[in-house]
Amino acid sequence: MEIILHIAELVLVVFLLYLFWPLLLFSFFYTRIRNRISLKSNQLETKHEFQLIIPAHNEEMYIANLLKSIQNCEYDKSKIHTLVVVDNCTDNTLQIVRNNNFSFVEKKNLDGSTKSKALSFGFNWLERNNKLNEDSFIIILDADCIIDKMYFLELSHEINKSNKKVYQTFRKVHNLNDSAVAALDAGAESIRQWLDLGVRDCLGLNARIHGSGLVFDLKVFKELLHLENENITEDKLWNISLVQKDVDINWVPNAHISYFATEKRDSFYQQRSRWISGQIEMAKKFGFKLTYKGLINFNLNQFDLGFSLLLMPRSFLFMITFIFTFVNYLFPAYFFLPGLIYVVFLLLFFVLGITGLVISGSRIHMNEILATAFRLILNVFSSTIKYIFGRSISSWGKSR
């Protein structure tokens, strides 16, 4: 029994060290990351052509904001082409797109959909109708996004400078002060951008694509669409494919988009459940294989991504750490590590969370955030256990 407990301790500590290493280095790189995020380039060109593909499923509340932001951007409009994939909508999304004079294609089927299926549908329509320029870059945006007016200028400048094929632009939450749930989402996004991507960028590691604000060379994107499109976390599958092929993923911290986070707990639970389900599916299929491949090939990017797939959600790790701390207090003789180690890790969870909230700039009262966070942690913990033992979700659907 003690041997099993010691192995569990070792596994947990390894996961926690991997989770917290960007936080431990963040203070050294903070100024550099902040400057990169706020930097405005002096030499801006409208050199590159962009094809935007926007999958939209019942997004009548948000789609107009995105379309307006595209219209208001500072760039040669003849080089920006937008296609909205109206995917099984039952609201006024189609009418709003039509009223704003944007191109669209309707996707109708009774079996539901995934985001990657909607993207494939839109891309195939563009190909069939000869709407694609070989030199174009494909940009994937969710319908609830808003782009900064300098977005395309900064992106074009970065592409011209780095000459890479895949980019992740900077994301932040637009409505971070509307609810405690949105504030927590904003904090999590700040951790992802400033710590996970920012610290890795400073160390010369690959960025990771995540959700929206994704930019691809046309040929690379076409190859990604040939992958299986049943998974609801297509960005993780794409990450895996790109890293396996040693394709660099560049972070573009000064090309900004914001998105509307869900404001209600039930919607947040549904959204996180889908993400956890997809995460565990990818971990089972690729996590160990990619981690092992990275080790034997001495490929740090492959190892980093592979191990990140195996990493359980922060809420799940927090609860496991809390349980170990409590049991260690009751039965210290059965543990290899002293209880103080677990207390330090618990404190690091709070430091990480507070860091994300401070960076995001949320003004929601901390008491409300903590109360909401506790309920969300319990929900994510229980959902993770369910999906580890086989439960899955197959449709991306509407989460508001």
Image: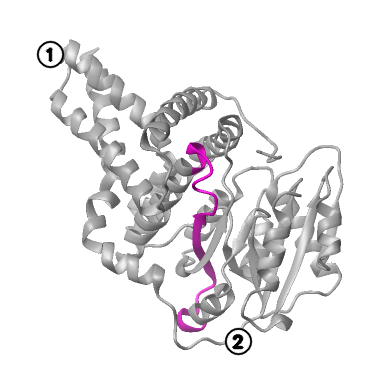
The image shows residue 45 at horizontal and vertical percentages of 56, 87
Q: From the viewer's perspective, is the residue at label 1 or at label 2 nearer?
A: 2
Amino acid type shown at disc 2: Lys
Disc 1 to disc 2, C-alpha distance: 66 Å
Q: What is the crowding at mark 1: few (fewer than 14 residues within 10 Å), some, or many (at least 20)? A: few
Task: Classify mark 2: helix, strand or loop.
Answer: loop
Horizontally, is 342 left or right of 263 in the view?
left
- Local crowd size for mark 2, using a 10 Å CA cut-off: few (<14), some (14–19), many (≥20): some
Dot 1 amino acid type: Ala
Residue 299 visible in image: no
Q: Earlier in the sequence, mark 1 or mark 2?
A: 2
Q: Residue at x 67, y 84 (%)?
A: 76
- Which residue has dot 1 on it? 333
Residue behind mark 2: 47
The residue range painted magenta reads: 160-182
Q: Nearer the viewer, residue 180 or 66?
A: 180
- At x 47%, y 88%, the residue is 43
Foreground residue, 167 or 186? 186
Q: Is residue 257 above or below residue 158?
A: above
Q: Position of residue 363 (x, y in %)?
A: 42, 46
Residue 173, magenta (yes or no):
yes
Q: Secondary structure at mark 1?
A: helix
Image-based side of 154 in relation to 100, left or right: left
Front residue of this view, candidates 297 and 301: 301
Instruction: Give coordinates of residue 211: x percent, y percent.
Output: 57, 53
